[in-house]
Amino acid sequence: MRYLIAALAMAGILSGVPAFAADEPITIKFSHVVAENTPKGKGALKFKELAESRLAGRVEVEVFPNAQLYGDNKVLEALLLGDVQLAAPSLSKFKRYTKKLQLFDLPFLFADIDAVDRFQKSAVGRDLLNATSERGLQGLGYWHNGMKQLSANIPLKAPGDAAGLKFRIQASDVIAAQFEALDATPLKKPFSEVFILLQTKGIDGQENTWSNIYSKKFFEVQDYITESDHGLVDYMVVTSVEFWQGLPDDVREILAQCIDEASDYANQVALEKAIGDRAKILQSGRSEIIQLSPAERRNWIDAMKPVWAEFEDEIGADLIAAAQTAN
Ligand code: LMR
């Protein structure tokens, strides 16, 4: 009996945590939706390189880009089921697990990506990595992509220009409210469908970062991009609590260091892509980049910012105030 109990415990059946065979490497599947040549794509590959060199023979990392394995609508469930072990969905995609991360979707909350960085590194920001842990998902770090721009098949200079248009959005109620405030129609669709929806005119526009607009060729099927910097696409690198706690202590510690180093790397790539991919789009001549004067930008702020009040209770006024101090 003693042996049976020991065997069951080793197999994780009694303890509820996965046991890892000592003589076989632990496989970590990392699923994401963007191209490889993006901050997240490169960050995932950097993590693989670091983890496999520091834990040679003990860990194997398989990276699946471009929603090859799971789209963002399914990946969090897949983590909980143990079908993948790492993902980095945008902070806009956690609403089924916590309302707090909706903070990052509030339009015009952060002045720029440096402010985002300061907030994420603050005690309050770090604490938000635990916002989904009661639901079985553990945040391990933040990765930047960058500030969002608005694109459409007509020029968007004033907020009223967006009225009546259909915009693809991520699965976020805050972003839906942001477009409703413009009298536009938001449609929640997976990232993998955006290009085809734009190409077939199933939607009129979308919002995303320079890196995503470039790497997924949205600029080839959108005539105008308004440089609005009105919001953020950033990521939470996430694993399941069960997988993470079930790892041998030394492996967990080294993997956490690898995530931290991959985060610094991905964030550096994000800064470079925000400038470099914008320049490539400009150079292509396929899409006109519309720059807003300070007064024009003020009009967008006035139109979108009322959304904050709608979500203040769900997010928490303290959290919103803490984020603003990073500006
Ligand atoms: C989107 O769905 O537009 C983004 O979250 C995709 C991504 O992962 O950058």
Image (tube, rainbow, N blue to C red):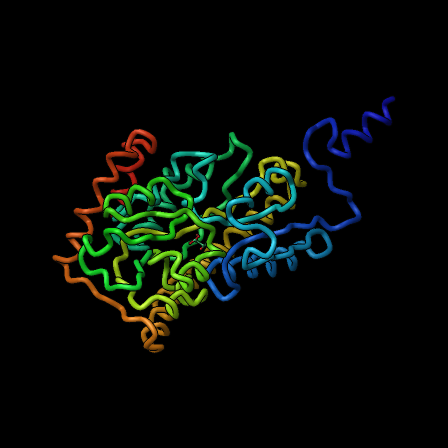
Residue 44 rendering spot, x and y as whole percentages: 55, 57
Q: How many marks?
A: 0
298 relative to 118 in the view: left or right: left
Residue 221 to residue 158: above or below: below
Q: Residue at point 33% right, 41% down?
A: 174
Q: Nearer the viewer, residue 172 or 17?
A: 172
Q: Residue at point 25% right, 58% down?
A: 228
Q: Residue at point 31% right, 35% down?
A: 319
Q: Nearer the viewer, residue 88 or 92?
A: 92
In which quarter of the view is residue 203 placed?
A: bottom left
Residue 182 rendering spot, x and y as whole percentages: 23, 48
Of the 4 image quadrants, the one containing the N terminus is top right
Of all residues, the one furthest to the top in this rendering is 1
Q: Nearer the viewer, residue 26 or 94?
A: 94
301 relative to 40 in the view: left or right: left
Residue 145 rendering spot, x and y as whole percentages: 41, 57
In which quarter of the view is residue 172 placed?
A: top left
112 relative to 13 in the view: left or right: left
Residue 241 rendering spot, x and y as whole percentages: 58, 36
Of all residues, the one furthest to the left in this rendering is 295
In which quarter of the view is residue 14 placed?
A: top right
Residue 150 to residue 245: above or below: below
